[in-house]
Amino acid sequence: MSGHSKWATTKHKKAAIDAKRGKLFARLIKNIEVAARTGGGDPAGNPTLYDAIQKAKKNSVPADNIKRAVNRGSGAEAGGADWQTISYEGYGPAGVAMLVECLTDNKNRAAADVRTAFNKNGGNLADPGSVSYLFNRVGTIEVEKADGIDEDAILMAVLDAGAEEVVEGEETFTVLCDPATLVEVRTALQEAQIEYDSAEVRWQATTEVELDLAKYRQVMRLIDALDDSDDVQDVFTNLSVSPEVQAQYEEEE
């Protein structure tokens, strides 16, 4: 029985991973379609499309899927959806501020999904503007750690292009810049032959709320519920946890 139980657990984990990969692919494809629709299908003349394609490739989205998404978005191929961007603001457990960005072809469905996730997981939606003031729009470029690449090498490459800061994480360096200089900073990395995983404009919290393990679990349940919606593209929060709490949480997963 223990062998059967272990196999069932393994299958469940694999199914969960496959489901997450499928959702990630769908979100990356949506970004490509929208970028091609708004700026044209030529990545050379459309930096947003270039970066959307780059991120999709880094996440192993098949080349055929990328090409078809570009064609649908640019109108070269039928079948593109009328994707619309809509954002929601709210608070999760422990007063964590949350911004939820959706890309949807059905605003009523997206609104219902987001509202249900908040209501069932200890959160509450807020009026527009009541949460977003706690965040700034920031250009972010993720660089995977590799031999010969350190914080000094990245700084040398990007400072003159307008980068403001390089933040070291466990597996990546994050280059922060004004959204207006994102393309210049990304180009400076390319010219220095430093590969990057993604370049995009994101929300960054100006203040953070530190959580213990119990509160972190509660907030992550809400984030997971939001991620379950096909309409939700990104969830930004001002939560903070210590490395110890993060490690404890990951052990439970």
Image: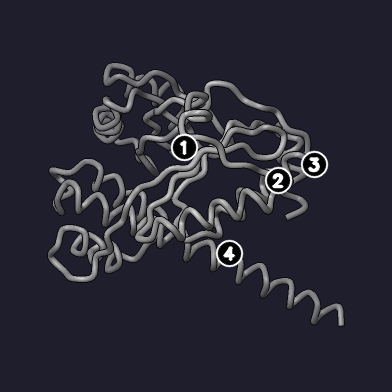
Asked if disc 1 and disc 3 are in contact, CB closer than 8 Å, the reply is no
162 left or right of 235 in image = left
Quarter where residue 202 is shown: top left
**What residue is pinned by disc 1?**
147
**What residue is pinned by disc 3?**
214
Asked if disc 2 and disc 4 are in contact, CB closer than 8 Å, the reply is no
Badge 2 density bin: few <14, some 14–19, many ≥20, Cα 10 Å? some
Quarter that holds the C terminus: bottom right
Colour scheme in the image? one colour
Badge 3 density bin: few <14, some 14–19, many ≥20, Cα 10 Å? few
Q: Earlier in the sequence, mark 1 or mark 3?
A: 1
Look at label 2 and name its amino acid. Answer: Gly
Q: Nearer the viewer, residue 147 or 75?
A: 75
Asked if disc 1 and disc 4 are in contact, CB closer than 8 Å, the reply is no
Q: Nearer the viewer, residue 117 or 148?
A: 117
Tell me the tag on residue 17: 4
Q: Earlier in the sequence, mark 4 or mark 3?
A: 4
Spot occupied by residue 176 in the image (x, y as percentages of width and height): 41, 26
Q: CA distance from mark 1 to mark 4?
A: 29 Å
Badge 1 density bin: few <14, some 14–19, many ≥20, Cα 10 Å? few
The label nearer to you, 2 versus 4, is 2
